[in-house]
Image: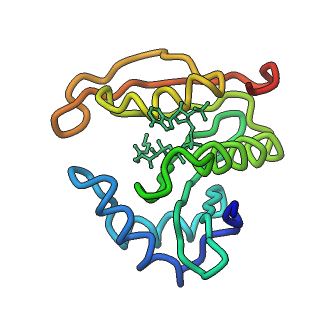
């Protein structure tokens, strides 16, 4: 069954952190970073929750019109390839549009083809590289201008 997408709350942070540490072992965000992010009005964080209450994904947007950033997006490994990442990204982009964003940016590790593939399918194009930005990898900067043609 497709998980429900809903706003992330402080009560979700412990479960989100567990996923974060599994998914980003080299550069996981701390509890404090998540708490700070949730406290800011120009942020929009979602979780993907299964019917039994298990969190299987999360994503965050920073929206400072006219620009927005995909702060993070992550799905539990055992749920990869089921459309949850796509659903989370669609929800972030919908919210960005509602908040008047005309240019979306993100950074992705150069050694993360799965995420780069997802972003390309949503119309993000590479606009720069930050060498050595991550531990063991460059950051690829990607941008999507709004509005674009319908996502595939
Ligand atoms: C990147 C990530 C969020 C994608 O989540 P997901 O739920 O697996 O994504 P979806 O099932 O919605 O698939 C969306 C796209 O991801 C890519 N993808 C999914 N499964 C893939 C696989 N097995 N191999 C390669 N690419 C794959 C494809 O481009 C896919 O598009 P498609 O549906 O047209 O095939 C997830 O793999 C993840 O959490 N990775 C670890 C954290 C991470 O790297 N986050 C991004 C940081 S910038």
Image spot of residue 115 (x, y percent): 46, 35
Residue at (66, 46) in percent of width and height:
63
The residue lying at 31 percent from left, 24 percent from top is 130
Where is residue 147? Give x, y as percent: 80, 24
Which image quadrant is residue 143 in?
top right
Residue 89 lies, in percent from the top left, at 64, 44
**Image coloring type:** rainbow
Instruction: Determine whether, in the image, residue 130 is placed left or right of residue 96.
Output: left
The reply to whether residue 62 is in sight is no
Picture quarter containing residue 34?
bottom left
Q: Nearer the viewer, residue 130 or 120?
A: 120
Most distant residue in the left direction: 136
Q: Quadrant of the N terminus?
A: bottom right
Residue 64, quarter of picture: top right
Asked if residue 129 shows in the view, the reply is yes
Please determine whether, in this image, residue 120 is positioned above or below residue 21. above
Does residue 12 lie above or below 131 as drawn? below
Residue 53 pos. (x, y %)? 60, 81
Q: Is residue 135 left or right of residue 99?
A: left
- Pick out the residue farthest to the front: 1
- Count up the numbered dots: 0
Q: Is residue 104 above or below residue 45?
A: above
Quarter the C terminus occupies: top right
Give me the residue at 53% from left, 84% from top. 11
Residue at 26% x, 26% y is 138
């Amino acid at each position: 069954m497709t998980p429900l997408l809903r706003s992330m709350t402080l009560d979700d942070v412990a479960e989100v952190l567990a996923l974060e540490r599994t998914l980003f072992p080299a550069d996981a965000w701390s509890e404090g970073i998540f708490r700070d992010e949730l406290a800011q009005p120009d942020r929009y964080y979602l979780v993907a929750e299964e019917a039994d209450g298990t969190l299987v994904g999360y994503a965050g947007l920073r929206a400072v019109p006219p620009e927005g950033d995909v702060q993070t997006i992550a799905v539990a490994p055992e749920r990869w390839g089921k459309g949850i990442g796509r659903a989370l990204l669609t929800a972030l982009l919908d919210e960005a549009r509602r908040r008047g964003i005309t240019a979306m940016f993100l950074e992705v590790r150069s050694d993360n083809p799965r995420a780069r593939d997802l972003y390309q399918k949503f119309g993000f194009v590479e606009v720069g590289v930050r060498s050595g930005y991550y531990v063991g990898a460059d950051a690829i900067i990607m941008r999507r201008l709004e509005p674009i043609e319908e996502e595939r």
